[in-house]
Image (tube, rainbow, N blue to C red):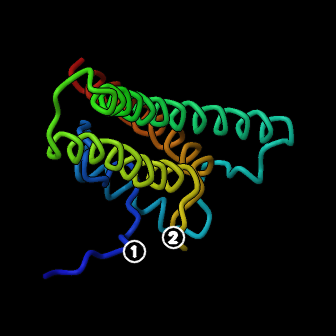
Amino acid sequence: MRKRNSQQEWLPWYRARGFKGSVSEAEKRHLDAYRSQPKHPAATYADLPEEAQSYISGMIVELLDKKREALFGWSLFWTTLAGALLLADYHRCRAATIWEYMFLAGIIVMAWVRYWFEDRKIVEEFFPSGISAPTCADEALRREWELQYLVENRRHAEKQADEWDV
């Protein structure tokens, strides 16, 4: 049996596994060069004014709460549904076998096991535990800078191509 690698290497947004964008490999290498510099050209969270930091922190907490509330609601729904069926079975409103009791109890257990795993993923998304992983605020600032850089770079290339055509 193969062990799972608990500490996966952190990848930037354009190198992430599920990324489906139109960033060429040359552009990715160019962004990698910026990221390998000691200081990225984008502002860091610490460089921002205190008002901006508190606003960003508030947005992060709100988004974290929304994701966790949705996950809690999902778990509560399945627990309530399975609990109601178990209660109906217990009061003999329905004929049930031991397998149905076990199945319904399994639904309750699995709902909260899923809640626990997904909650850990959500917290890791917002507050990475890896040494090399940047905070979500710093990464968002870098991503915005890099997207703006790519757009401006492509506009400049198109403008130069148009000048050559004339």
Q: Nearer the viewer, residue 77 or 143?
A: 77
Q: Earlier in the sequence, mark 2 or mark 1?
A: 1
The tag on residue 7 is 1
Marks 2 and 1 sit apart, C-alpha to C-alpha, by 7 Å
Q: Nearer the viewer, residue 121 or 100?
A: 100
The C terminus sits in image quarter: top left
Rendered location of residue 60, percent (x, y): 64, 38
Rendered location of residue 74, percent (x, y): 40, 31
Give the answer, above or below, for where 132 lies relative to 83: below
The residue positioned 39% from the left and 49% from the top of the image is: 13
Q: Nearer the viewer, residue 33 or 89?
A: 89
Q: What residue type is labelled 1?
A: Gln
Rendered location of residue 1, percent (x, y): 13, 82
The tag on residue 23 is none
Residue occupying the far right of the picture: 50
Q: Which amino acid does label 2 sit on?
A: Gly
Counting labels gives 2
The tag on residue 130 is 2
Mark 1 Cα-neighbour bin, 10 Å: few <14, some 14–19, many ≥20? few
Q: Are marks 2 and 1 in contact (CB under 8 Å)?
A: yes
Q: Which of 91 and 81 is in front in this view?
A: 91
Does 14 sit left or right of 119 as displayed?
left
Does 56 sit left or right of 138 as displayed?
right
Q: Is mark 1 on a helix, strand or loop?
A: loop
Does 38 sit left or right of 83 as displayed?
right
Mark 2 Cα-neighbour bin, 10 Å: few <14, some 14–19, many ≥20? few
Residue occupying the far top of the picture: 166
Q: Is mark 2 on a helix, strand or loop?
A: loop
Residue 11 picture quarter: bottom left
The residue positioned 36% from the left and 74% from the top of the image is: 6
Residue occupying the far front of the picture: 92
